[in-house]
Image (cartoon, helix red, strand yellow):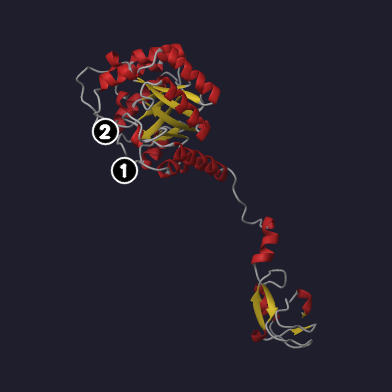
Amino acid sequence: MTNFKDGLIIAEIGMTHDGSLGQALQLTKTAAECGVDAVKYQLHISEAETIRNAPQPPYFKAEPRYEFFKRTAFTKEQWLQIKKQCKECKVKFVVSPFSIEAVKILEEIGVDAIKLPSGEITNIPYLEYIAQTGIPVIISSGMSSWTELCDCVKIFKEKNCNYAIMQCTSEYPCPPEEVGLNVIDQIKETYPGIPVGLSDHSEGVWAAIAAWMKGATIIEKHFTLSKKMYGPDAKMSMEPEEMQLLCESIKNLEKALHNPVNKNNADKFREMKKIFQKSIVAICEIPKGTVITEDMIGYKKPGIGLETKYYRDILGKKVKRDLSFDDIIYEGDIEW
């Protein structure tokens, strides 16, 4: 069972494989090496999903979508090889199906979770079919209104599904002012206890880290071996170095958040304090029995003598031994 509350960093491979099983297997392996918890693919069946002359998205016009999806489609046997690779690499196998027919294939193959594509959130027959499968669901809210999102969530809530909700803005790339970090708070308030995440199309790692700080437990970023690869996703995807940085940053952030520091206990810095803090020292010759005045003392490293906070307390007091220039003054050197 996929537990969305445990935290998931998802590498969205999407269609970057361009129909090559070898590329898909390598993308999975490399993403796992970067430290992700899951990889996500897209399952398109052209004739079940789109008419031939459907409009093209503005960010990819290299070939008609109908032909592109048909050319890059995997067979059931190839999907099983990808699933096997995920298991061997110890990452979860997540897929976005774009039709009921695609969902039926996933039922046969077996997946750790289905991620709803943003464009399917109002496809009621599709949503109802997925809800009855019992497969864990990640709901993406990329191009939906709040009402549409709530209508979608209601279907999965009524079926007692294991589901999570992702804030997403369907812009490629997404500008900072459109990321919608505030929506994470709204989802948490509206659906208390339901895992929340960010499907992030902005550039860099900053939005994902900010979302995690706000309580998101799922982060999804597009992933590629190179931004120069062909297809609709590559140029807006993270390359391995950046994905590794994201994974390391979030996992280090988790350690920091779950290990509070007690500022009342500085024992571990005791030796360091001796090196970097200062003591009261003599800045001139001070014979034994001399009454200390302010012009006789200074404050210098190391911090092994009388602490500087006691400087007022020793003014007007006599020294019990001869002190030379730069001698550290200790508590026992003063006639209290």
Image spot of residue 97 (x, y percent): 37, 20
Tag 1's secondary structure?
A: loop
Is residue 133 visible from the viewing direction of this image? no
In the picture, the disc for residue 59 is 2
Image spot of residue 302 (x, y percent): 68, 69
Q: Residue at x 42, y 45 (%)?
A: 206
Is residue 257 visible from the viewing direction of this image? yes
Closer to the camera, 223 or 279? 223
1 or 2: mark nearer the eye: 2
Q: Quadrant of residue 304?
A: bottom right
Q: Residue at x 45, y 28 (%)?
A: 27
Tag 2's secondary structure?
A: loop
Residue count near mark 1 (Cα–Cα under 10 Å), binned few <14, some 14–19, many ≥20: few
Closer to the camera, 183 or 201? 201
Instruction: Pick whichever of labels 1 and 2 is earlier in the sequence.
Output: 2
Q: Quadrant of residue 322?
A: bottom right
Residue count near mark 2 (Cα–Cα under 10 Å), binned few <14, some 14–19, many ≥20: some
- On the image, numbered disc 1 is attached to which residue? 175
In the picture, the disc for residue 119 is none
Image spot of residue 252 (x, y percent): 54, 43
Q: Amino acid at mark 2?
A: Tyr
Image spot of residue 59 (x, y percent): 26, 33
Please indicate whether residue 331 sits to the left or right of residue 51 in the image: right
Give yes or no for contact between labels 1 and 2 (Cβ–Cβ under 8 Å).
Answer: no
Q: Residue at x 48, y 28 (%)?
A: 38
Against 294, residue 303 (above or below) is above
Q: CA distance from mark 1 to mark 2?
A: 15 Å
Q: Quadrant of residue 117?
A: top left
Please indicate whether residue 65 sits to the left or right of residue 24 in the image: left
Q: Amino acid at mark 1?
A: Pro
